[in-house]
Each structure stands twice: as structure tokens, then as C-alpha cells.
Image (cartoon, helix red, strand yellow):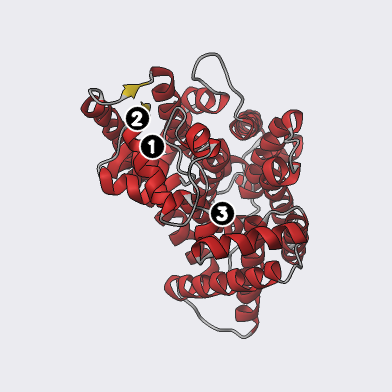
Amino acid sequence: MAVIAHRSVRASGVNAGGARRVHLDSLVAAVTALGIGAHLPLPGPLTLTLVLSVALLPVWLPHLARHQSGVVALTGLGAILNGLLLNSVNASTHHISVPLTEAQIVLILELLLGSGALVWVRSVVGSGWMGLLFGSGMLLSVLPRLSADNPWKFSLSLPVTICLLAAAWLVKARTGELVALVLLALVSALNDSRSAASILATAFLILSWQRARAALQLRSTALRVGVSIVLLGLMTYFVMQSFILQGFLGEGAQLRSEAQIRSSGSLLLGGRPEIGATLALLRASPGGYGLGVVPNFADIYTAKSGMERLNYDANNGYVERYMFGGAFEVHSVMGDLWLRCGPMGLAFLLAMLVLVLRNSAARLAEGRGRALTTFLAIQVVWDAFFSPFYTTAALALTVAVGLLVRLPTRARDDAAGVPE
């Protein structure tokens, strides 16, 4: 903590009289980043993330008002209102769970307010420290409750990745960032985490291309970088699929992938049959269903029919208990938000993705892309389509927005106390 405060004082150029205030700001910012990352539950629907973000609202809100994030705030509040309106519309045909409604509202507020608080944290301690503290909070939270089934894939992967890439950012080790991406991709591949390995490999290729482009003195734009990212992502997908099918990532991954391709014709559709349920439910009700709405028999039948179109046997406990046992859960942030909050839920997610992707592409075009921001930009796009809107995906999106919102002026990425 003293190191953070010292760098903040040095970077901001304050005199001895202001040093005490800088130290206090650094301490509060560090605790905030740790607490938001830890996401500890509190009595009722509250969490430490929400309490910290609300308590510091007078501190970070005036700071955030100078940034281009108004669309995110408006669509986030609109999503909650849209979801509550859908509740009243569907109350005659569906059961509305009050605890579920509260929990789903809190998750959206955590994303909205937590990312704003992290922007302020970043302006005080710098991007590298903010990422390291946030990742450490996540790690401390998951260590006591490690998954017995593949702890790396289901518990450690994201917090460890954030911590290592943030640490490399702090020590200005750009080559170290590339080495970390390779090592993390190998660990993920060996632990049957196909998506994480692919995301890390894509981030490695993008940053390697950034370095090559700088060496060749090639100019670029955010649009060209965006096209390059799409092409590199597709290339990584097909290369990883080839490795999996040839057994390089283990026999279990090979057999499972072969079965998924046989059933649906695609590794993505075979691995995520929930897509079929999402599309079927949205065809039946394009406006969504509502916050805290519990699926009825007709909803479950509709969802199963959509999954069966992908040659998936939907008559199992996973569909009946996990996906629709007490809430709509279609294993994608986009699908979950649309079903819960209607079109405004979709608009909220798109506003955040546009902010993250536009600013990430701009950084890469300027040669300022870092492993952590590049990895998170890819991760949140993956989560939007293929991960449930639970704590892990929400935290990834929270820290991605916090790191990639443009601050008023630019300085060095690792400068504490100075906006970048």
C-alpha cells in the first residue's frame, strides 16, 4: 500500500501538505479494488461490491461525469426499468420471485456502479495496480471454495490470469506479457479449458502483431485493428479445433469435441446447445420475460424444442434444474439480459461491449495495447455469447469497462495517480 501511495505522490507532483490526502485516497482506492474483486456476499441481496460502490458514489461519480460513459449508465438503468415493467406484464402467466428479482437487480447495479468506482480507482493508483488489486480480491475470494472438479477451469483461471497480466503491466514487461499469455494458455489447455486457451492464444497473436507492426513502422486505425482481430480470432479458433480433434489437448477433449461436431455440425453449437433455447424463447417473446420471472411449462417446452433442433437431447436434469429450475439461464450474458430485461438489457450489454472494443482497438492501433486489456476485451465478447450472467462474467465485464474507459488525459499506463 505504501508503494502505491508513494508512486501516486511522485506522479501527481503534490507537496508534503497534500501527501496525506494522496495516501488516504490510495488506501481507499486499494481497498475498493480488492473489495469489488472479492464480491463477498452480505446479508440479504447485498454484496460488498455494491456497498463499496454506493458508499463511494460521491467520490467517483463527479469524476466519471467527465468520461464518455453516459450511454452505459442510461441503458443500465433502462434495463432495470424494462425488466420491472416486464414483470408486471407477465405476472398473470408467470410466478415472480421477489428474492430472485432483487438478486438480478443487484447484479446489474454491481456492474454499472462497480465499473464506475474502478475508473476512479484507476485514476488514483494506475491501471496496473488496479488490475492487480482487483484480481487479488477475486483470488482471495475463490481460494476458500475451490471447485473440486477442475479447480483451474472453474475457479482459478480468471483471477490468476488478471493478476499475472497486471503484474507484467506494472513492471513494464511487454515481453513478459507475451510469455505469460503463452504459459497461461498452456495451463488452460492442459486443464481442459478450451475457451480460455483460445482466448489467451488470440490475445498473444494480437499483441505479437502489434509489435511486428511497430517494428515495420506500419500505420493502422481502430477499424483495421478490428478487422485484424476478427481474422486472428477465426484463425485461432480453427487451429485450436484442429489441435483438439488431433488429440493434442487430451483424449477427453478430443472425444467430447468430436461428439459435439457430430450432433450439430459445429463445435460451438454442439458445445453450447443453449443457443437453441435462447433463439426459441426470443422468437416466442421478443420483448423478454422480466426480472425474477420463473419459467413456466410452456417456456420450458419451447426452450427444449429449440435445443432439440440442434440434435441435443434436452430431457435431462441440466435443462430442467439448472437452466429453468427456478429462473431463465441460457448460458450467455446476452441471452440472459435480453430474457430478463428485454431490448434495454440487450442495449445495456451492447453499450458496454462497444465501449470496451472501441477503446481496446484504439489502444492497439496506437501501439498501446496491453495483455490485460486485450485479454479482457476478448473475454467479455466470449462471455456475451457463451457464458452465464453470473458473478464471474459480471466481474470480467466490470474490470474491462473500468480499465478501458478513456480518462480525460493520457499518461503512461503504469503511472499511479495520473490519468492515462
- Which one is earlier in the sequence, the residue at label 1 or at label 3? 1
Crowd band around label 3 with a 10 angstrom C-alpha radius: few (<14), some (14–19), many (20+): many
Quick one: 163 or 283, which is closer to the camera? 283
27 versus 385 height, above or below:
above
The amino acid type, in three-letter code, at marker 2 is Asn
- Which one is earlier in the sequence, the residue at label 3 or at label 2? 2
Q: Is residue 50 visible?
A: yes
Residue 201 is situated, as x and y percent measured from the top left of the image, at 66, 65
Secondary structure type for disc 1: helix
47 versus 12 height, above or below:
above
Quick one: 44 or 13, which is closer to the camera? 44
Q: Which residue is mark 2?
A: 296
- Residue at x 35% of width, y 31% of height: 297
Picture disc at residue 386: none
Quick one: 200 or 385, which is closer to the camera? 385
- Residue at x 45% of width, y 70% of height: 222
Picture disc at residue 300: 1
Label 2 – label 1 distance at C-alpha = 6 Å
The amino acid type, in three-letter code, at marker 3 is Gln
Crowd band around label 1 with a 10 angstrom C-alpha radius: few (<14), some (14–19), many (20+): many
- Residue at x 74% of width, y 45% of height: 152
User: Does residue 223 appear left or right of residue 178 in this picture?
Assistant: left
Residue 111 is situated, as x and y percent measured from the top left of the image, at 47, 37
Labels 2 and 1 touching (C-beta < 8 A): yes
User: Does residue 4 appear left or right of residue 306 in this picture?
Assistant: right
Picture disc at residue 379: 3
